[in-house]
Amino acid sequence: MIWNEFALGNAIHIKHGYAFKGEFFSDKGDYIVLTPGNFFEEGGFRIRPDKERYYTSDFPKAFILEKGSLIIAMTEQGPGLLGSSALIPSENRYLHNQRLGLVDHIDTNLLDKLFLYFLFNSSLVRNQINGSASGTKVRHTAPERIYRVMVRAPDVKTQAKIAEILLSYDHLIKTNQRRIQLLEESARLLYREWFVNLRFPGHETVPIKDGVPEGWRKANLFEVCDVTYGYPFKANLFNCEGIGTQIIRIRDIPEMKSNTYTIEEIDESYLVRRGDLLIGMDGIFHMNNWAGKTGYLVQRVCKFRPKVEILLAFVSLALIEPIKYYESTIQGATVAHLGTKHLKEINLLIPRGLDVCLKYLNDLLWQRIYLHEMNMQLAQSRDLLLPKLMSGALDVSQIRSIA
């Protein structure tokens, strides 16, 4: 099979975004202003509930993105994001910001659109984009630099087949993500119904005294959980090559994966295992039950492990509102800090006689963790296939999609 080599500028055109004014950003509205934060490092569109920025003023309608539009991160807002690509998931919702590039023209005789999406997320293209980027603290690229990127591609029909195989992984990952969201929503609703509104099974026959069901008790968070604060690792011993021991930083909590390692010796007490509740103590207080590979806590990450296993999901759900409250009320000179004094203010109402309900919440939590782990395995398999398919090292006719 013949693979042609050409510069991207011979096949595509990239349109600059609009300079939306920060004074009109809001936490609600009809249109969301996209940023590089809406990209995953490995590529793909990232929805950020409660963190989206809406626009409340007039703007040129030509900057409303259509469903399926291919966009490129032109600014490295976070590590590894420069050059990442994403496909817009819905119509009449998202705005084309100036830090993003829109591929508004593709020569379909040279490139299939979905193949191009994966091409941007391959090391072949990313390395070239990073190599020509400008800036020191924050790095940038531009359409003119991307046009100079050299790529190799087979005929368009074969490109479409390659994209179909890779997309089958993405589709299964998205299906699992929707299942995760449903599990999370179900758990939150049941927790609120049973343990906040106190409409738990059999509540009609349980006496209430001072707003507390008979037999229930109030307990401080530290009485219910073993709490471990992270270790102050030496940053000069960090590496991203997988050498030594994996460490878990605040930024790793949402996606439950880390690419940071250290050669320092660490006490086993800082080890994070599946299901442990982690909370970031600086800035945005990220919170999640860990489902990634085994790692160790870095300073300013806190681990909560209930002393009674049946309370794992209960505690995780009970801490959502207090942590949100602190996130909105704690202020620092530059970065907000969640401290021990705040955590010690948290008291929980511990139920009695509802083991069936607690076990059910735990089941929902472990299903969610399992799906997260499945998605990480799917993403790893896709990422192993990606460079081989995009370079022609694997014969596409020998591979089938998994969907």
Image (cartoon, helix red, strand yellow):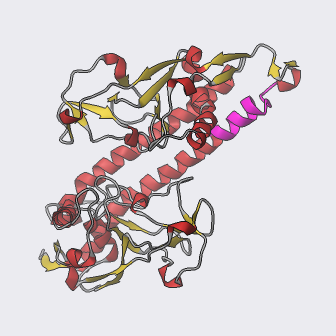
One can see residue 362 in this view:
yes
Coordinates of residue 185 in the picture (x, y in percent): 62, 44
Q: Is residue 156 positioned above or below 340 on the image?
A: below
Q: Which residue is drawn at 36% across and 45% down?
A: 376
Q: Is residue 106 above or below residue 297?
A: below
Determine whether 152 is above or below 294 in the image. Answer: below
Q: In which quarter of the image is the N terminus?
A: bottom left
* Residue occupying image coordinates x 34% and y 44%: 377
Asked if residue 403 shows in the view, the reply is no
Q: Position of residue 161 (x, y in %)?
A: 29, 70
Question: Does 116 appear in magenta?
Answer: no
Please tell me whether residue 195 belongs to the stretch shown in magenta: yes
Quadrant housing residue 86: bottom left
Where is residue 320 shown, x and y percent of the image? 60, 36
Q: Where does the C terminus fall, quadrant-wise?
A: bottom left
Quarter of the image holding residue 364? Answer: top right
Q: How many marks?
A: 0
Above or below for 318 versus 266: below
- Residue 7, given in percent of the width and then of the height, sits at 16, 79
Of 86 and 140, the residue lying toward us: 140
Left/right of residue 168 with respect to residue 153 in the rendered view: right
Q: Which residue is located at x 15 percent, y 65 percent? A: 392
The magenta span reads 187-202
| Residue occupying the far front of the picture | 333
Magenta span: predominant SS is helix
